[in-house]
Image (cartoon, grey):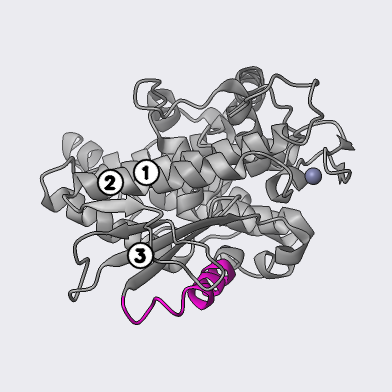
Amino acid sequence: MYILRTAPTWLFQSEVAALDETIKGVLESILNVHLDETQWCQAALPVRHGGLGIRRCRELGVVAFLASAHGTLGLVARILSNNGDITQVPFASEALAKWTTFYGGGDQPENPIVQRGWDDMLCKKTVANMLEGAVGSNLARLKAASRVESGAWLHALPSPSLGTLLDNDSLRIAVALRLGCKVCEAHRCVCGVMVEEDGHHGLSCLKCAGRFSRHHAINDAIRRALVSANVPCVLEPPGLCRTDGKRPDGLTLVPWQKGRCLLWDATCVSTFAPSHLNLTVRSAGSAAEYAAKMKHAKYSALEPMYDFVPVAVETAGPWALEAKEFIRDLGRRLRDKGCDPRSGSYLVQQISLAIQRGNAAGVMGTFEPGTIRDGFI
Ligand SMILES: [Zn+2]
């Protein structure tokens, strides 16, 4: 970072390209995923823009230098006892010219001393270019990836003792799904349907394992967070059946707000299922919103007595608005009870990890018994 901020690295294109190629090679080795140019371009975006946060020096060099040049100009002028208008940081104007060719215009961020300002402009441009050329599930994937919550698992500290370490297969599948890489060879699922290389069938196949463990993991994360916030609760509360005999996932045993107890039900729907794709190509999270609406309809008989919240999420990561608000509220209550100020973020990460583990289990569940060890979770 020091070199990128202080040296005109864009003048050394082949060296920078070699360095980027090395980073890409290491990334491919660690993940066991092959990246083509478009996928590498997405991977190199920050997590908040839908990437993996493994940056490329090619773009970062220019924005880092520009921010540094603007930030140090005042100090350089003072040291040289010069008027700031006259003093020039060497290579600053060349960096600006390079920026114009990269960005495709002369616009500059509001606060040019902040690197993120330059970086965000460039990243938004890259995302817009990728969206322009994408259709179908690729378009849905890119839209979903740029939602903040869908990358939460990438921010989790990978720790076996905290349960936040993804095993190699889950990490590989999670990254491949995020970047649209090849997940597996095309094969026939246990249900008889063909699974394409993108592995998407495994995310919505009713015969595949994964859905149950994911459902359980999401509910358990919510239950433990409620307990930490001093809100006693039960999973699958007895005596609260819908007309079809199914029970909601959880109930708080003390009022949540306005004297009403909270009732929640979690669901994870596939962003790429053919029945959802017409929604998810239009706007990220719309399959989750639709699932939330269906949950409200299912539990309408219980709504007069309880505060019902559907915790609806999608396999590609986006959450429905109500789920986000509920988890944000829960995070705030954890902080109020003296828990770690980052408790809310940790809870989001846990749910995000549960989604990714469920995806991996879904994909691995498409293989015939005997081709894979039993009990993959
Ligand atoms: Zn299947």
Q: Quadrant of ligand 1?
A: top right
Q: Find the distance from the CA under tag 1 to the CA under tag 2.
A: 6 Å
Instruction: Please tell me which residue lies in front, 298 or 79.
Output: 298
Circle nearer the viewer, 2 or 3: 3
Amino acid identity at mark 1: Ala
Q: Which residue is mark 3?
A: 263
Instruction: Please tell me which residue lies in front, 20 or 229.
Output: 229
Q: Which x, y percent locates residue 205?
A: 74, 48
- Which residues are drawn in magenta? 289-305
How busy is the neighbourhood of tag 2: few (under 14 within 10 Å), some, or many (20 plus)?
A: many
- Image quadrant where one finds the N terminus: top left
- Sequence-first tag of 2 and 3: 2
Q: Which residue is mark 1?
A: 221
- Sequence-first tag of 3 and 1: 1
Amino acid identity at mark 3: Leu
Residue 225: mark in rendering:
2
Q: Find the distance from the CA under tag 3 to the CA under tag 1.
A: 15 Å
Q: Residue at x 75, y 65 (%)?
A: 275
Q: Residue at x 54, y 69 (%)?
A: 289
Q: SS for tag 1?
A: helix
Amino acid identity at mark 2: Ala
